[in-house]
Image: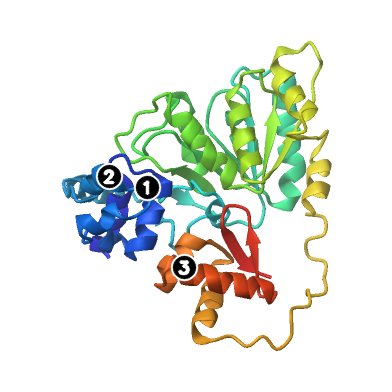
Amino acid sequence: MEENLKYKIAVSLIPNIGDVLAKRLLAYCGSPEMVFKEKKSSLEKIPGIGTINAQSVINHRIFDRAEEEIKFIHKNNITPIFYLDSNYPKRLLHCYDSPVMLYFKGHTNLNAEKMISIVGTRDATDYGKKLCEKLIAELASHQVTIVSGLAYGIDICAHKAAIENNLPTICTLAHGLDKIYPALHAGTANKMLDNGGWLTDFMSQTKPDKENFPQRNRIVAGISDATVVIESKSNGGSLITADIANSYNRDVFAFPGRVDDVCSAGCNALIKQNKAALIQSAEDIIKMMGWNQIGKKHLPKQKKLFVELNNDEQKLVNVIKEKESIMIDDLCLLCEMPMSKVSSMLLTLEFSGVVKSLPGKMYRLN
């Protein structure tokens, strides 16, 4: 178990190998351990790797750092989550650049039925804060998990309102779990641990450097069903999160503001450019997300009758069923089959109405 975790963490530490290439390595090599046991000549042939990156892979000095992180994990009751683990946030699996490793501290379901990310300006007005508090109070009866970034302004207002309304709330951090930034919000962050928690893809000892925040924003956008923007300036960081959410084919909602209000310029622009749906209350979100229909019985969709699957096709279907939705690279890895074979079988299964292709090379059962 410890050895396996060491290899999982080490994959995320390979220099110049981001999450996308790391997943490709895993798909070709078959497991985290095999990534580091593969010959350099074989690694060089993997698309996107090449000689320099192959040399980085066989640099085993990263294991020392992985083992150090495991000690921190045990000491501080952190839950490490590899992207093929069953408790990995399933919504993030739809995102092509989702983190290979996540680190979580707290108690909540990262795959809750309803999750909303709420973002906005750090210089929130009283109007914006009241909108945020009212929105979350209205969502309380639907038991929505609230996600935000613990920053000043709208973020911390969302977390506090969630706690006030007994809703789970998760803060996504741009640094390791050995600190809380900003420190002023540590008290609120600690209150989250019983019904929510702290989530990051950064290891301990990582400082909250400026470049980490856009990377953090992809988790904010990807882990939820939708992103709500409450007040944003024309160049606010919330617009980055909204753009990422749009790239993931997620719903984005924004509250409009006065045309001359600096703090509403970003929201108005999102609405004007059709990058966000205009909302005025939680009722608008509930209707557009179809949450008022949850619990009502629907007739199951008719599938093609008498589809006969061979053993390999059945293996693919079983894995897709277990994961609900999955990237083709991950499917190759879990089924231990080459990409060419899996692609051919998926095409056949799609024509038969058994599976459905989704954006980002994702597949699910039809």
As displayed, is residue 154 above or below residue 13? above
Residue 180 in sight: yes
User: Of callouts 2 and 3, which one flags the residue occurring earlier in the amino acid sequence?
Assistant: 2
Task: Read off the residue under disc 2.
Answer: 53
Task: Out of 289 and 161, give the one closest to the viewer.
Answer: 289
Q: The residue tagged with tag 3: helix, strand or loop?
A: helix
Q: The residue tagged with tag 1: helix, strand or loop?
A: loop
Which residue is at 44% across, 56% downward? 83
User: Of callouts 1 and 3, which one flags the residue occurring earlier in the amino acid sequence?
Assistant: 1
Task: Read off the residue under disc 3.
Answer: 340
Which residue is at 74% across, 40% downward? 137
Q: CA distance from mark 1 to mark 2?
A: 9 Å
* In this rendering, position of residue 287 left or right of residue 33: right
Q: Amino acid at mark 1?
A: Gly
Q: Quadrant of the N terminus?
A: bottom left
Residue 80 in sight: no
Task: Give the x, y percent position of residue 22.
Answer: 37, 51
Which residue is at 27% across, 52% downward? 44
Task: Give the x, y percent position of residue 70.
Answer: 26, 51
Is the residue under label 2 in contact with that under label 1 (CB below 8 Å)?
yes
The answer to which quarter of the image holds residue 14 is top left
Task: Read off the residue under disc 1.
Answer: 48
